Image (spheres, rainbow, N blue to C red):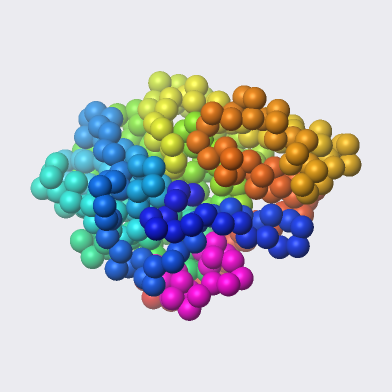
Amino acid sequence: MGKFRDRRWRLVVAGAALLVCTPRFVAASAAAAEPTGAQPPFRLQSLGHGVWAAIATPHGSAGSNAGFIVGSTGVLVVDTFEDPGAARALLAAIRKRTALPVRYVVDTHYHLDHVAGNGVFRDAGAVLLAQRNVRAWERTLNLKFFGAKITAAERRMVQSYVRPSVLYRDGVEVYLGDRRVVIEVLPGHTGGDSVVEVPDADVVFTGDLFWGRALPNLIDADTRAQIASDEALAAAHPRATFVPGHGVVGHAADVRAFAGYLEALRSAVAAARARGLAADALVRAAAPGLRSTYGGWDYFDHFIAPNLLQTAAELAGKKSVPQPPPAGSWAAGTP
């Protein structure tokens, strides 16, 4: 996850196990927040053929990457940032580039740094789509990122998130006039992850299944499945441009490099566990070797300890991951 504007990084610790490393809100309501100061929330990068990536700027209010696809009859947006003000800035950027309506938004997964701006686009007339687990998880599982001392204002904010109204299980195709967009569900990051493919432009928006030269948040991840998904994406789209959920835009080699980090992480953890190491001792033993290869990646110092400990829990069969809601309950409740 990215840094929230005017919010501090912190560690949420349960017993001896580090559960998550994430920003904490200090504003009373993100719904009222606007980007402030000289730092823009994102940098727009044209990928050609009417496809744009919105790459979060360091210390800006976007918190994650997003993007949009312009067809002959409308626009599809991929993710909506962690701050509604940044989402409004994205909507304004779209309107500077096309008069066509924003018809659809795809939430690539439920994490709050990708969905907090949904209401901005819903109010602009867009239909929100996501894998069906996402609707239930956006207002429930996002509460964990604030820890045990979550405030009433933070709880209200999460429960006010505008959720997707069109749900799919394995994927769906969307047509923007003569432009076809393929949305595919792949396992790994949360259990409700979508990638958005633009075949005629050879562009793939991966959500957080791929991080561009950056260590990932693995709080919900099944790393074995995520490696398989990344390898499959790279093989299926050998010449594509990949827009990650965080970090820089890349290509198939970069997706494979990220999968290589996850493989190295699993190997380092397995070796440390074989020596009987756990908790801080495991981190001290495994981190230096990973630093030698990946220390130059973004968020290394922030995420290396959580990555190691969460992967240790995964390999031990003790990691808690999101569970699908009961059958038939996806559409319950208000948007």
Q: Is residue 83 left or right of residue 98?
A: right
For the C terminus, which image quadrant? bottom left
Foreground of the two, 296 or 142 = 296
Q: Looking at the image, is 84 positioned above or below residue 64?
A: below
> Can residue 207 be seen in the rendering of this structure?
yes
Foreground of the two, 79 or 265 = 265
What percent of the width, then of the height, locates residue 193?
Answer: 50, 48
Foreground of the two, 189 or 268 = 268
Q: On the image, which quarter does residue 199 sit in?
A: top left
Q: What residue is drawn where x is 53% and y is 40%?
A: 299
**Residue sticking out furthest to the left:** 99
Q: Is residue 34 left or right of residue 64?
A: left
What percent of the width, then of the height, locates residue 81?
Answer: 36, 53
Q: What residue is drawn where x is 62% and y is 24%?
A: 293
Q: Looking at the image, is 186 positioned above or below residue 107?
A: above
Q: On the image, which quarter does residue 320 sit in?
A: bottom right
What percent of the width, then of the height, locates residue 283?
Answer: 74, 41
Q: Looking at the image, is 218 positioned above or below residue 161?
A: above
Q: What residue is drawn where x is 49% and y is 31%?
A: 213
Q: Mainly helix, strand or loop, the magenta region? A: helix
Is residue 260 highlighted in magenta? no
Q: What residue is drawn where x is 54% and y is 65%?
A: 146
> Can residue 187 be seen in the rendering of this structure?
no
What percent of the width, then of the height, locates residue 316?
Answer: 80, 48
- The magenta span reads 142-161
Is residue 149 highlighted in magenta? yes
The count of marks equals 0
